[in-house]
Image (tube, rainbow, N blue to C red):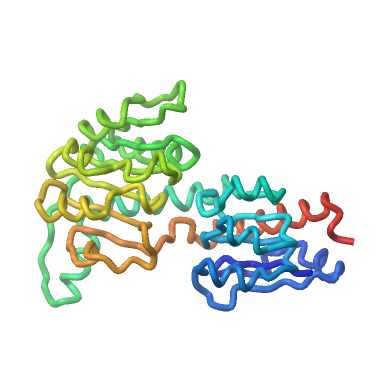
């Protein structure tokens, strides 16, 4: 029997209950590629003797889960479960667990970093100075802006609190929220009123391209889009058009429909790009790995799979 850690990076020092597995004769295998796995790679690494999986964002499709004949528990290092076929997991009686609280602060702080970077042209100014151009770029204050937060879960709430501390106006759009300290409006109204639209919701067919051509056109001329959530929420082709036309002033993106991202948005000066690293703060990463490994081992104990 084995447990596979398929996330692209994992510090085994965070696996406090590792001895429970080894004492039960369970081998622990790490991702040998140090990169996000493809469907085929996951199937190959899982084999037919893996009882537990500590997962990242690799595609855990129905094909993958059906091929892993012994798999009983998946523990996600992170919050989103859109990379897991939850229907297939339920049919196959595979428990799926996650660490929803751990990434909140790190993702929220990267969101703030991107917003401030856009408003003050930080990445563009850095590139200019490195190219030998010493010229200050005029920006604007966050305090003067209306920030629209789409999705008001753990991360959206944290972002709203941090934004409000700057003195900016905050509005939200989340039909699941019944009461809030912030005005809750429809998405079209949020797009119309916001200077910055920041996305904080999971990806699904219902949220695919939730920011599309229509909603970009609703946004103010000179406004910004920030997506530190999931690829697929923003229509990237239409975003490119809106940015090139000057209708939108800029965008900050940490996630894309296809990753690693190699598209044209990389060539625009007013686009900030990071490599899906919202949770990549050392303290947060350690906490996520500790929690995922604890959940995995406890679940295996409850299933009497560790003797």
Residue 283 seen in render: no
Horizontal side of 268 relative to 298 (left or right) equals left
State the image quarter where residue 41 is shown. bottom right
State the image quarter where residue 263 is shown. bottom left
Compared to 128, does 240 lie above or below? above
Q: Position of residue 264 (x, y in %)?
A: 22, 65
Horizontal side of 41 relative to 220 (left or right) equals right
State the image quarter where residue 75 is shown. bottom right
Q: Quadrant of the N terminus?
A: bottom right
Give the residue furthest to the right: 307
In front here: 121 or 194? 194
- Residue occupying the point 75% across, 62% down: 70
How many numbered markers are drawn?
0
- Residue occupying the point 26% across, 47% down: 225
- Residue occupying the point 56% across, 58% down: 60
In front here: 138 or 16? 16
Residue 51 seen in render: yes
Q: Quadrant of the C terminus?
A: bottom right
In front here: 135 or 244? 244
Q: Position of residue 49 (x, y in %)?
A: 75, 68
Compared to 69, does 143 lie above or below? above
Q: Position of residue 59 (x, y in %)?
A: 52, 60
């Amino acid at each position: 029997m084995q447990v596979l850690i398929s996330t692209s990076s994992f510090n085994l020092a965070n696996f406090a209950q590792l001895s429970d597995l080894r004492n039960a004769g369970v081998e622990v295998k790490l991702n040998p590629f140090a990169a996000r796995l493809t469907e085929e790679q996951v199937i190959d690494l899982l084999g037919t003797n893996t009882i537990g999986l500590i997962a990242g964002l690799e595609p855990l499709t129905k094909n993958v889960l059906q091929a892993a004949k012994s798999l009983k528990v998946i523990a996600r290092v992170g919050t989103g479960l859109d990379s897991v076929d939850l229907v297939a997991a339920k049919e196959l009686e595979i428990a799926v667990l996650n660490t929803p609280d751990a990434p909140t602060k790190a993702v929220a702080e990267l969101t703030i970093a991107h917003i401030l970077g856009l408003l003050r042209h930080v990445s563009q100014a850095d590139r200019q100075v490195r190219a030998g151009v010493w010229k200050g770029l005029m920006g604007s204050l966050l305090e003067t802006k209306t920030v629209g937060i789409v999705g008001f879960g753990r991360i959206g709430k944290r972002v709203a609190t941090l934004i409000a501390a700057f003195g900016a106006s905050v509005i939200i759009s989340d039909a699941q929220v019944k009461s809030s300290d912030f005005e809750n409006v429809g998405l079209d109204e949020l797009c119309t009123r916001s200077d910055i639209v920041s996305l904080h919701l999971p990806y699904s067919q219902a949220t695919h391209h939730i920011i599309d051509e229509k909603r970009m056109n609703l946004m103010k001329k000179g406004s910004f889009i920030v997506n530190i959530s999931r690829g697929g929420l923003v229509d990237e082709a239409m975003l490119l058009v809106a940015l090139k036309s000057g209708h939108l002033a800029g965008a900050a993106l940490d996630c894309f429909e296809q990753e690693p991202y190699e598209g044209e948005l990389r060539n625009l000066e007013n686009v900030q790009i990071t490599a899906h690293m919202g949770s990549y703060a050392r303290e947060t990463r350690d906490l996520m790995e500790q929690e995922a490994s604890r959940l995995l081992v406890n679940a295996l104990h409850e299933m009497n799979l560790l003797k």
